[in-house]
Image: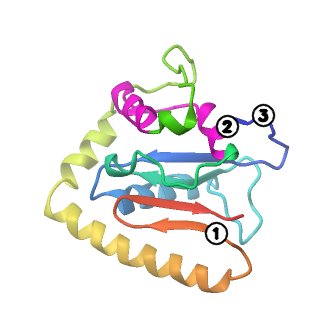
Amino acid sequence: MALGNATPESDFDVIVGARFGRIFTARFFCFLTFSLPGWWVDHRLNKVKDRFCFNHFVTENSFRLSPPYDIYGKNLYQKLVPILGKPEIIDAFLAANRDWVGVGINYRDDLRHLHKESGAVKFFFEKILGGRLGNQLERILKAIQIRKIERSLEKERQYKPRIKYDDDELEFHWY
């Protein structure tokens, strides 16, 4: 939709900002929230249409997206539509990429930017998972997800994926 080339079979690509030290936990909760009702893209089963593809997670340390910068990425990020998030965090992300994206987007009056403040559920989970319990859960989820990612990469050798997975950034683009 952002590029104007959506088809009836298209999915919705999503980039998620996560707190440093909780990127794998954020991905797990996105998966849990969107897979239970059947909204998570499943490429193995060719279930893509009208589903959400969480293909990029960043922390403040990786707001500056990794090169190579190409025309596709430039067009995509020029038309990015923030749905959730505090304006100051979104602005920091946009500022970190402005030199290669070019013209900044104006989302502040966009009706699609629905939630500007954190809700009670986020506050609750951040309090519970903010300390040692959260650190332990992050280590476990990181180990499980990295094992799955690496197994998937072994199986998909015919593609040239742009994959990055570390504590600062998770990027999953299969070309």
Residue 114 placement (x, y as % from top left): 49, 25
Q: Quadrant of the C terminus?
A: bottom right
Q: Earlier in the sequence, mark 1 or mark 2?
A: 2
Q: Residues within 10 Å of mark 3 (few under 14, many from 20)?
A: few
Residue 99 placement (x, y as % from top left): 49, 35
Residue corresponding to mark 1: 161
- Please tell me whether residue 87 belongs to the stretch shown in magenta: yes
Label 2 or label 3, whichever lies nearer to me, is 2
- Please tell me whether residue 27 belongs to the stretch shown in magenta: no
Q: Residue furthest right?
A: 8
Image vertical order of residue 143 relative to residue 45, above or below: below
Report the predominant secondary structure element of the magenta stretch: helix
Q: Quadrant of the N terminus?
A: top right
Q: Earlier in the sequence, mark 3 or mark 1?
A: 3
Name the residue type under label 1: Pro
Residue corresponding to mark 3: 4
Distance between mark 2 and mark 3 Cα atoms: 10 Å
Q: Tell me: 143 left or right of 35.
A: left
Name the residue type under label 2: Asn
Q: Residue furthest front?
A: 99
SS type, badge 3? loop
* Residue displayed at 14% across by 64% down: 132
Q: Earlier in the sequence, mark 2 or mark 3?
A: 3
Residue 75, labelled with which disc? 2
* Residue displayed at 59% across by 37% down: 77
Q: Which residues are magenta?
A: 73-96
Q: Residue furthest left?
A: 132
Q: Residues within 10 Å of mark 1 (few under 14, many from 20)?
A: some
Q: Tell me: 128 left or right of 16.
A: left
Distance between mark 1 and mark 2 Cα atoms: 20 Å
SS type, badge 2? helix
